[in-house]
Image (cartoon, rainbow, N blue to C red):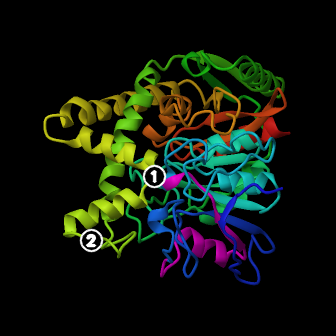
Amino acid sequence: MSLNAFITKETLDGSDDGPLAGKTVAVKDNISTEGLRTTCGSAMLEDYVPPYDATVVELLKDAGATIVGKANMDEFGMGTTTETSAFGPTKNPVDESRVPGGSSGGSAAAVAAGEADLALGTDTGGSIRCPAAFCGVVGIKPTYGLVSRYGLVAYANSLEQIGPIAPTVEDAAALLDVIAGPDDRDGTTRDAGADSNYAAAADGDVEGLTIGVPTEFVEGADEGVEAAFWAALDELEAQGAEYREVSMPSVEKAVAAYYVIAMSEASSNLARFDGVRYGKSGGYDGNWNEAFARAREDGFGSEVKRRILLGTYALSAGYHDKYYAKAQDARAWVKQDFDEAFEDVDVVASPTMPVPPFELGESLDDPLQMYLADANTVPVNLANLPAISVPAGETDGLPVGLQLIGPKFGEETIVRAASAVEN
């Protein structure tokens, strides 16, 4: 099986003991690994070797894990299929004619195919949960601030989080136990959850749990996906949980708000890749401006260029209030809707993705289709909440994921509910 799940395959050994001793881990290629190439799936960084480890990589090594390589990804995390990588697409191990999801598609495919026991991905708008759902594995997007982002090559700072991908809920929770906690090098991290035992929460006990189902998250889903979703909720009900409908009207604006914010932050973050500070350099004629333009033209792919241009436009004079400010207002509305929902329910549930995995090449000519597929995942990032995707059945032989969303730092609750689905 040749899935192209890895950009670089090289082993980095951890300590001789620890909670992850004997476990192999694939690390998404936008997370810094000292002495090991970190490309972000881009020709812009194809030769970049970081001089330091990200905090999460240090924690993996201290826990005894063996890093077996850097996982393929959509370029700079921008995509839902892992087809925008400069190193070629990753295939879905369930069906090699399908995409594995993105942008952490290489991480999910490596775990699903048994090429790594565990993996780290990053989630800016669903980039852990989408590939977990498409590949039939478990992925956790932690609360913003639970896991250090030091050493993560930034795409959209206010949205993204590093999180685990694993074959089971307990394995994913055990990896989260290792990487969670405050970090002096990341001022956005918090003490909350540092003393939690997420793996122990995977006990399947959902007696008395109340699940909210926003109708807006289910409407328009593929028939097979919707059937698997309701069957999973019925199983949770049989185990002692109850579910009820809740309304989240802000979801209608969430995708548009997310992409305005994410692209605006990306246009700022990627300005450093100019061929002088970072990125491709040398061999360009002309003055500095011409060399700068050539380096970015050669180094970035079409999807990255599209997002930089749109983000720069949204932040430009005369348009900032029209687009970016309104997107931030919509973001506050999304957070308010979740806060109100959690006054009455313990978790919120939805299909992770409204459709089964795309066929390879299907969405490349229609970026809007790819953006709209994130409708159920991006609200979580806008509200900085935790969420998990757990396998919930199949449609036409393809995996379907159930997404469970918790209140801020409510990882133990969503792990417990997900483990009941798994059992």
Q: Is residue 73 magenta?
A: yes
Residue type, label 2: Asp
Mark 2 neighbour class, 10 Å CA radius: few under 14, some 14 to 19, many 20 or more: few
- Mark 1 or 2: in front is 2
Q: Residue at x 76, y 48 (%)?
A: 169
Q: Residue at x 63, y 42 (%)?
A: 129
Residue 365 image position (x, y, % from top left): 53, 33
Describe the element under mark 1 as helix, strand or loop. Answer: loop
Residue 290 occupies quadrant: bottom left
Residue labelled with disc 2: 285
Residue 148 image position (x, y, % from top left): 49, 63
Residue labelled with disc 1: 301
Using residue 89 as the reference point, say whether residue 39 is left or right of it.
left
Per the rendered image, the range of residues in magenta is 50-75
Look at the picture and state if 251 lies above or below 127: above
Q: Are marks 1 and 2 in contact (CB under 8 Å)?
A: no
